[in-house]
Amino acid sequence: MSMEKTTQQIGKDILFSVLNSYSQIFFSTSKVLAAFLVLISFFDYGAGIGGLIAVAVANLLAYYLGYNTYFLKSGLYGFNSLLVGLGVGLAFQPSVELYVLVAISAITCFFLTIVFQGVLGKYGLPFLSIPFLVTIWIIGLSGGELTALNISERGIYTYNELFGLGGHTMVRLYNWLEALVDSSFIRIYFYSLGAIFFQKGLLAGIIISFGLLIYSRITFVLSILGYSVSYLFYILVGIEFNSLSYTFIGFNYILTAVALGGYYLIPGRTSYAWIIILLPSVVLITISTQHLFQVFRISPYSLPFNMVVLMFLYALKLREKRPGGLIETPVQLGNPERNLYLQSGNLKRFPARFPVAASLPFFGEWEVSQGHNGEHTHKGAWRNAWDFIITDKNGKQFKGSGDFPEDYFCFGKAVTAPFDGTVMEVINSIPDNIIGDVDTKNNWGNTVILKHTDEIYSKLSHLKYHSVEVKEGDRVKQGQLLGKCGNSGRSPYPHLHFQFQPTPYIASPTLDYPLGHYLLKGEKYTFETFSFPQKGQVVANPVKNEQLAKVLHFIPGQRISGEIKIENVKTGAIQKEDNFNWKVNTDVFNSTYLESEEDGSIAYLYNNGNLHYFTNFTGKKESPLYWFFLSIFKVPLGFLPNSSIRDQVPVNMMFGGLLKFLQDFIAPMYLFLKVDYSLEIKKSGDILSSGDLKMVSGITKRIAGRETAKYDFTINIKESGVFEIEILANDLKIQMTCRNE
């Protein structure tokens, strides 16, 4: 029985890998899109059979040779071989010899896929369709010697082939489409889409476009944008655009737009603008490579697309600064809408974007006396810095007359490492100034410079004379004592100067980089994530609640069980009572997730020691795991009673149907759907002691700014680690209990 189950699972994995190989050509794992693509691949039966044989051979090889299961299931090992099978199957008449050649070509292409994955993967780059290009060129250059194979004559007698495919109905459909689509602009668009799958004629392109529309509105729009921009450039420079109707090379423009506009970059105004900028280059490369490859009587196929996409992605990786509008996809969900909605909820949630989650370099509450682009200093290349002081309840920073450094509340207070790093430079021998005087010769005064990554350093300056506790080369941990706040250098009164910088030098320009996590004091404390304190704000480091940190530390292999009861508030009737079981797992990217054993729902989460948050949810909505996901969507592990936090839940987590469909079209430009999240600790006692915790959170759905629905959550966390959650959603009251097994 166990063996039978294993065999079934193998068959299921191979089936998914084959289907995903089809949809992966459009950077997708959509089974619906795959079904459309499998269908149109058989419009030419020789190509269809060749593609199916090739993708099966490649995926079986990947499975039995033990390659990565995730890449296998997602179709990444098979789509290049699929393209080779389609191309070779189209070029020759069907025969046993042809399909032997297809199988050999698929094997060659598979190993090229592994090679290019390894080589380009070192640079964080995708291998795209390069393995296909190398393989199809090998076959093309060898074609004249393959005398046992006959060149395909399909496509010469179109009506005969259509009749054989679907009788008079197919012929009438063909004639109707030819008469209906009389615009050469639209016709060539459909031809270009069909050519991606080596298919000729309008019907294949129309079916693919319909499949794209169902799979992703953003991908559909990008396909039109890429094609249209190229068309306008053809007209602008006087190239004959109708040539695309028989060269079928226009798919390069569509694939480039889809790849850069919505897959490898977060869809948005900036990514769309770069499509417009880059596509003329794709056109020029397409035209020039066509002439070059004519010498060898082969086609450049997707070479222009590969060249421009890889060039641009590699160039982006060499940037020192990463503008907010041009963001590489940090977590690839296989769908442009999901990528966008996940990112738009909170740009600051992704650790890949901010590898250094720096804390404030001190204990207690300090005030920002000067922020970025300051009034006195912090100008030009040194504008991205902060000055911190300590003030009393009346806003004064000193006691008495303030004539001596010792009168200032911050003088002599501990200065700590903002993040783990290595000490690169120490200055410790500059005397403190008398109040009102400055040392312009030793501008920065006593200083410690730390290296956190190759591109991110921090500098802490104006430290107290002979107070530095570390030396060059020391490794320090976040929160470790470095020295004491002083009044050395260009410092008329005691304060701490703090900045990030891209190099380890004392006079280095500053880096526009946020602080990781801190509490902002107001009527309530608010928890800020990767943000920039402003002048006059009072800030403090969160103090970790050990109980909260413990219960939200989900360990792979851990099991959680519980009960749920759903009651109608109006009638008092119990609608559902059930038990549930979850397990904590990790995926190939070492991402942690909770998985429901009942319905397979998955909630992905991240915990960096300072913050717990869920990153994504897939599966059954309104299930126990879904309500758990929403109730503690984002929870700081360092909190004070009555402090709060706000965020946004990805739109696709809460909206669906026609509204979501319409939002998808304009999402890169404007979001009229929003889901607000808030959380507040109500009861905690001493933050350092154990005891029951009470939090309240809320989800608010908005359409064009107008509130349309609200969900209220009350979360009690017992000292034993048991979660008791009550949810008020519309007319329902939902009660959940979750406990570790």
Image: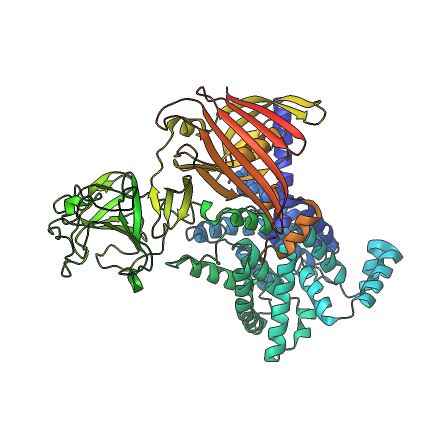
Number of marks drawn: 0
Way the structure is coloured: rainbow
Residue at far bottom of view: 238
Q: Position of residue 571 (x, y in %)?
A: 72, 25
Q: Where is residue 697 in the image (x, y as percent from the top left)?
A: 52, 35
Q: In this view, does 510 lie above or below 675?
A: below
Image quarter for residue 501? bottom left
Q: Nearer the viewer, residue 325 or 298?
A: 325
Q: Residue at x 13, y 50 (%)?
A: 432
Q: In which quarter of the image is the N terminus?
A: top right
Residue 183 seen in render: yes
Residue 95 seen in render: no
Q: Which residue is drawn at 72% across and 55% down?
A: 210
Q: Which of 719 and 434 is in front in this view?
A: 434
Left or right of 681 on screen, residue 187: right
Image quarter for residue 582? top right
Q: Which residue is drawn at 44% across and 22% down?
A: 692
Q: Is residue 168 above or below residue 629?
A: below
